[in-house]
Image (cartoon, rainbow, N blue to C red):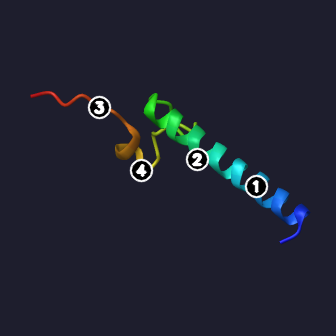
Amino acid sequence: MNLPTLILTILIGAAALFVIGRGLYSRRHGKGGCSHGCAGCPYSRLCQKEKKEP
């Protein structure tokens, strides 16, 4: 493996870790990932924190 290939691999890996880390941070802090609203989203039940009434 030559030096330019190694540097490019490290940069791509760092970018991937940044994107994954930012997504996890946003999810843990209750921010949505798609920002399009949940009215017509089939996955809205997975990201909405609804309070269930007894």
**Image location (x, y in percent) of residue 34:** 57, 42
Q: What residue is shown with label 2? A: 20
Identity of the residue drawn at 46% across and 48% down: 41
Give the SS element for disc 3.
loop
Distance from the alpha carbon under mark 3 to that under mark 4:
14 Å
Task: Name above or below for residue 30 compared with residue 13.
Answer: above
Task: Name above or below for residue 1 compared with residue 37.
Answer: below
Between marks 2 and 3 in the image, the one whose residue lies nearer the viewer: 2
Distance from the alpha carbon under mark 3 to that under mark 1:
40 Å
Give the SS element for disc 1.
helix
Q: Are marks 3 and 1 in contact (CB under 8 Å)?
A: no
Q: What residue is shown with label 1? A: 10
Identity of the residue drawn at 47% across and 46% down: 40
Residue 26 — which label? none
Which sits in the foreground, 19 or 37? 19
Decide if residue 8 is on the left or right side of residue 43: right
Q: What residue is shown with label 3? A: 50
**Image location (x, y in percent) of residue 43:** 41, 50
Residue 43 — which label? 4
Identity of the residue drawn at 50% across and 40% down: 24
Identity of the residue drawn at 36% across and 46% down: 46
Graded by Cα atoms within 10 Å as few (under 14), some (14 to 19) or many (20 or more), the crowding at tag 2 reads few
Q: Quadrant of residue 13?
A: bottom right
Graded by Cα atoms within 10 Å as few (under 14), some (14 to 19) or many (20 or more), the crowding at tag 1 reads few
Distance from the alpha carbon under mark 2 to that under mark 3:
25 Å
Q: Does label 3 or label 4 sit earlier along the sequence?
A: 4
Q: Are marks 2 and 3 in contact (CB under 8 Å)?
A: no
Graded by Cα atoms within 10 Å as few (under 14), some (14 to 19) or many (20 or more), the crowding at tag 3 reads few
